[in-house]
Structures are given as structure tokens and as C-alpha cells.
Image (cartoon, rainbow, N blue to C red):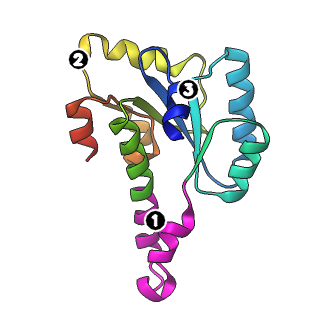
Amino acid sequence: SVHVLYAKRANKENWMAIIHVNANELVELNNFICWSNRAEFRNFLFLTRDPMMYEEIMKRDMPVIYLDRSLVDATNSPQSRGGNSDIESAASVLQRFDFLFSVLKAGYHFFYSSVRAVYLDDPLRQVSSFHTGEAYDVMVRGNNTHIASAPYNGPLAVRSTNYGQYFWK
């Protein structure tokens, strides 16, 4: 069950990193796994919509959640969407948002990021320190070098509080 996976992967403050992996990011996946082993960082799980990437991660015995693309694609077939890739992209994002909301509803806080991000230390330690005394429920990147990126590309941290869940809805 996903709840067992969450319990195993979350740190003692109920934070876990959710690392999004796209197709063709095998090099980045290798880098992240190598870093996590060196840093002894275990409070993460991978999230992917690519079946081949899912199989690759499973072969490595790493925690992964697979969001079945066919569930989105079936409702957005070329016939029903008129070939509109914007609708398909939006459906993909909504599927990811629904999954992340389920993490919050289960009582876990998440730090969401791409596998392309490079960390020098445990990102959850830093995120947890920002939330000391429950001062913040949501943290998004405040760096304008990524202004062209959509906010769902991360990094993004949300606490499982009433305000955090309300924000995510």
C-alpha cells in the first residue's frame, strides 16, 4: 500500500521528498541514486508517468510511484481533444497534483522536485528548519532565475496542515 511506503520513506518529522522522473532522464536518475547512497538520504520516492522509467527504477529496488499515463490519455484521446497537446499536458499536471494531494491527506509533508536538481545535503533538513514553529505551510522557489518555469516543476514544499491542504486544493 502507498501508506506503508510513505511511512517507510518519511523522516521523523513526516517529510518526504518526491522526485519526479521523466522519460530520457536515466543519467539524472543515476546521479540522484549515487548521491542519495553517498549522502545516506533515504527519505524520498520517485514519481514517474513513463512505464520504461518505472521498470528501470523497480529493477534498482528503489521506491517509485507510477502514474498510469493511459488513465489521462484515455480521457484525452486525439478524437476527444482534437489533437490539443495543451489539454494532455494539463491533464498530466492535474494527475500529478491529485497524487501530491493524496500525500497531504495521508498526513505527510512533501518536498517536490525534479530528478535534475542537484543537492549538496539533505533537502528535507533545510525545509524542516524553515517550518520550525509551524511558521510556513507552503514554500516555493523564490529565485527569479527560474521565472520561465511553471511552479509545478519544483522545488516546492507543502506541509500537511489545514492551510497546506487548502492551498493545494
The residue sitting at 53% across, 32% down in the picture is 4
Q: Classify residue 125 as left or right of residue 20.
A: left
Please identify the residue farthest to the right as the structure is shown.
Answer: 59
Which residue position is annotated with label 3? 9
- Tell me: residue 30, above or below residue 68: above
Among numbered discs 1 and 3, the one appearing first in the sequence: 3
Which residue position is annotated with label 2? 135
Q: What crowding class fits label 2: few (fewer than 14 Cα within 10 Å), some (14-19), or many (20 or more)?
A: few
> Which-is-in-front pick, marks 2 and 3?
3
The residue sitting at 67% across, 15% down in the picture is 39
- Tell me: residue 123, above or below residue 85: above
> Which-is-in-front pick, marks 1 and 3?
3
Instruction: State yes or no: discs 2 and 3 in contact (Cβ < 8 Å).
Output: no
Q: Magenta span covers which residues? A: 67-93
Q: Secondary structure at mark 1?
A: helix
**Label 1 vs label 2: CA separation?**
34 Å
Which residue position is annotated with label 1? 89
Q: What crowding class fits label 1: few (fewer than 14 Cα within 10 Å), some (14-19), or many (20 or more)?
A: some
Instruction: State yes or no: discs 1 and 3 in contact (Cβ < 8 Å).
Output: no
Three-letter amino acid code at disc 2?
Ala
Q: Secondary structure at mark 2?
A: loop
The secondary structure that most of the magenta stretch takes on is: helix
Q: Secondary structure at mark 3?
A: helix
Quadrant (top left/top right/bottom left/bottom right) for the N terminus:
top right
Residue 128: tell me if it is visible.
yes
Three-letter amino acid code at disc 3?
Arg
